[in-house]
Amino acid sequence: MESVANSTALAGRAGGLPWTLYAAVAGSTSIVAGLLWDISWHSTIGRDTFWTPAHMAIYLGGILAGIAAGYLAIKTTFAGTPGERAAAVRFWGFRAPLGAWVMVWGAIAMLTSAPFDDWWHNAYGLDVKIVSPPHSLLAAGMFAIQIGAMLLVVSLQNRTAAAERRRLSLLCVYTAGVLLVMASTFVMEYSDPNLQHGNLFYQISCGLYPLALLTANRASGLRWGATAAAAAYTAIKLAVLWILPLFPARPLLAPIYNPVTHMWPTTFPLLLVLPAIALDLLCRRFPPSTRRDWLLAPLAGAVFLAVFLAAQWSFSRFMLSHWARNWFFAADQWWYEARPGGWRYVFWNQETDALSPRGLAVALLLGTIAARLGLGRGAWMSRVKR
């Protein structure tokens, strides 16, 4: 009990929890908000510099997380209680929770990418390629901070008394939701409603989202852990979708085929809440066990695919209709380089990528692998105490 009491006094408190925890979560949120804002900026205005507000939001998130993690390392090493030092990982003579070290690496990677990206723009132009070396380094750093924040939360959750545990579990699923936003953003170009009748969309989705949802279920210990994570993802995406178009903006780079007048709203969130509910219900019938998880994984992959396919197949038809062309769903909103035409209202690549039994079989296999990884990672996170 003494070690539990010591562990809750990591770095000064804010509402009963360490301020470093809130700083880490705020930093991870700032990163995804800035990332979506930056995508909107490029789609609406085109021209940017290093000093755009979206970039500042991204790097602010990295700085917040880096400060929180650095403080934890210094505090634990030089002024930590025996309980804090016992619940820390030693690295180069310093001690800090595992999540703090992951965030330190992420912050260093992000801040290193900033001057690298500025030099790259000066040498090769403004975002000649999305996947450039500085952007890849930045993406790795951002993912590290998201994962580090979640590890920091679960390590404290797993060694804290019941009084604070529920709040930490809710923070856990929130960080999982932020990670979902991050992951979905990096596959955004494969997730347009126009692509949601094709094999590739369902294969990518099955290979990605069950992992995150089942990790949230197992790591948080909540009955509705996956659903809560999907709800957090949905709330963040909707907030960005509805707030960005409130700001006027116009393109500053040619060619301009679509003269937009406000910030592009990004895209409506995927209906991940529905398969998340199904996965939570399924996990209730299979208590955590390594042996059961091997049996649960193919079932979870099949359930995710069935529910997600039924939801998105129908919803994508709606998103291409005139009924979705309003502020709530923000359908038919296009970047400034998009040419007008009927191509906007049809499903793409149906000659080469139409949904097929073979494509669904690949999606099911990927979903099974992702589900098994998610169950395993979630089980591991539920035991992390450092």
Image (cartoon, rainbow, N blue to C red):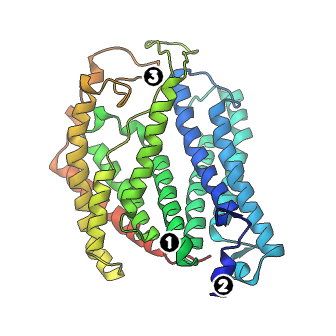
Q: Secondary structure at mark 3?
A: loop
Q: How many residues crowd mark 1 within 10 Å: few (<14), some (14–19), many (20+)?
A: many
Residue at the spot of label 1? 381
Residue at the spot of label 3? 335
Q: Are marks 2 and 1 in contact (CB under 8 Å)?
A: no
Q: Of the numbered discs in the image, which one, if any, rests on residue 80? A: none
Pick whichever, 336 or 220, lies toward us: 220
Q: Are marks 2 and 3 in contact (CB under 8 Å)?
A: no
Q: Secondary structure at mark 2?
A: helix
Q: Is residue 21 left or right of residue 182?
A: right
Nearer to us of marks 2 and 1 is: 2
- List x then y, in percent, for residue 265: 46, 29
| Amino acid tagged 1 | Met
Q: Is residue 265 left or right of residue 146?
A: left
Residue at the spot of label 2? 3
Q: How many residues crowd mark 2 within 10 Å: few (<14), some (14–19), many (20+)?
A: some
Q: Secondary structure at mark 1?
A: helix
| Amino acid tagged 3 | Trp
